[in-house]
Amino acid sequence: MKAVVTRVTEASVTIEQQVKAQIEKGFLVLLGIGPDDTEADALKLADKICGVRVFEDNEGKMNRNLEQAGGQLLVVSQFTLYANLKSRRPGFSGAAKPDVAIPLYEKFISACRNEGFHVEHGQFGADMKVASVNDGPVTLLFDTQN
């Protein structure tokens, strides 16, 4: 499972010209799921992302986690994180098929909610317009295989 996580002051997902989800301060999580990923990967990744300390403390140091910062999450499915870029036209056969990916996407969201966070999300497989105001910018790459 892979994720690109951006610290944001706000983020939103629009589908068919309607805002589907939006958050204020927190993380925009672009979540990619591979064919060999498991529920354990979803739980591990949720724990890592929710616990990472990248919000500034009173001294301006990145020393606070999402909970301490009062942050929220916006999770968007992102199969393109598994793109094969050997040629100029990316291939996406390395991404999990929907029958595997959807339950794990939902498990990840559920795990973040179980940790007490407000979680908004996009719509799996939809054509989404994602907007965000990066804070910092701080952008992190997570991969459960590393």
Image: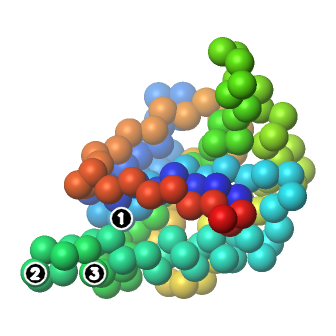
CB within 8 Å, label 1 to label 2? no
In the rendering, which numbered label is found on residue 128? none
Q: CA distance from mark 3 to mark 2?
A: 9 Å
Q: CA distance from mark 1 to mark 3?
A: 14 Å
Label 1, on which residue? Answer: 26
* Residue at the (86%, 52%) spot, across then down: 35
Q: Residue 5, relative to residue 50: is it above or below?
A: above
Task: Indicate left or right for 98 with 21 as reference.
Answer: right
* Residue at the (66%, 15%) spot, across then down: 88
Residue situated in front as seen by the camera: 134 or 74? 134
Residue 115 visible in this rendered orientation of the protein: yes
Label 2, on which residue? Answer: 59
**The C terminus, quarter of image:** bottom right
Q: Nearer the viewer, mark 1 or mark 3?
A: 3
**The N terminus, quarter of image:** bottom right
Question: The disc labelled 2 sits on which kind of residue?
Answer: Glu
| x then y, percent, for residue 10 | 30, 53
* Residue at the (86%, 44%) spot, across then down: 97
CB within 8 Å, label 3 to label 2? yes
| x then y, percent, for residue 68 | 31, 84
Is tag 1's residue or tag 3's residue first in the polypeptide sequence? Answer: 1
Quarter where residue 121 is shown:
bottom right
Question: The disc labelled 3 sits on which kind of residue?
Answer: Asn
Q: Secondary structure at mark 1?
A: strand
| x then y, percent, for residue 72 | 40, 68
In the rendering, which numbered label is found on residue 63? 3
Q: Nearer the viewer, mark 1 or mark 2?
A: 2
Residue situated in front as seen by the camera: 102 or 78? 78
